[in-house]
Image (cartoon, grey):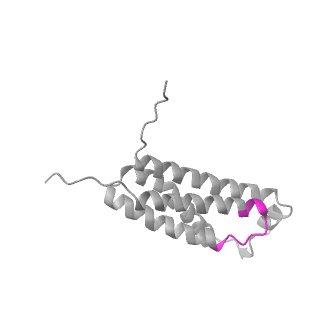
Amino acid sequence: MALEDRKIDVKLKLAALWCSLVLIYLYADLFGFYIPGHIDQLRGGEIAGFQITQVLLLGFMILMTIPSLMVFLSLTLKAKMNRWTNIIVALLQLVFVLAGIFDPNIYFIFASGVEIVLLLLIIWYAWTWPTQESSS
């Protein structure tokens, strides 16, 4: 007997990739708390050499909100808008990941590599969105 293998809609693939990306973002940040001295830096009001301010925290929140919202948008936007939104947002997220890849911690470099692969898959699936013949 052959196993059933149903075709998965591109919208579901994109939403799943965005979910995976958000989880990797969160785990990479969470594991940072295990680095000796990291929590002391945070208590001292600094993160990665930047003073922790409301503006910085708002920036981080916006950066994390965008891929979180992409889960919903990937499922609900019309195909053409969905395709371009996924491509553009994934490219912007890719810039942020590449900007932070120079962390000396091996776990973070690994997480960044996974994030890059996920973002490239998002771009690929959106770019190769299936088309259908017009019936006019």
Which percent across, then down, holds residue 27? 68, 53
Kindly identify the residue that appears in the image at 58 percent across and 69 percent down. 59
Furthest residue in direction right, as rendered: 36
How many numbered marks appear? 0
Specify whether residue 61 is painted magenta.
no
Which percent across, then down, holds residue 48? 74, 72
Q: Nearer the viewer, residue 22 or 39?
A: 22
Kindly identify the residue that appears in the image at 80 percent across and 67 percent down. 41
- For residue 135, side relative to residue 85 (left or right): left
- For residue 66, side relative to residue 103 (left or right): left
- For residue 82, side relative to residue 38 (left or right): left
Q: Nearer the viewer, residue 66 or 4?
A: 4
Quick check: 24 above or below 61?
Answer: above
Which percent across, then down, holds residue 116? 60, 63
Specify whether residue 107 is painted magenta.
yes
Q: Nearer the viewer, residue 43 or 92?
A: 92
Instruction: Write the start and end of the magenta stretch as one range.
Output: 99-109
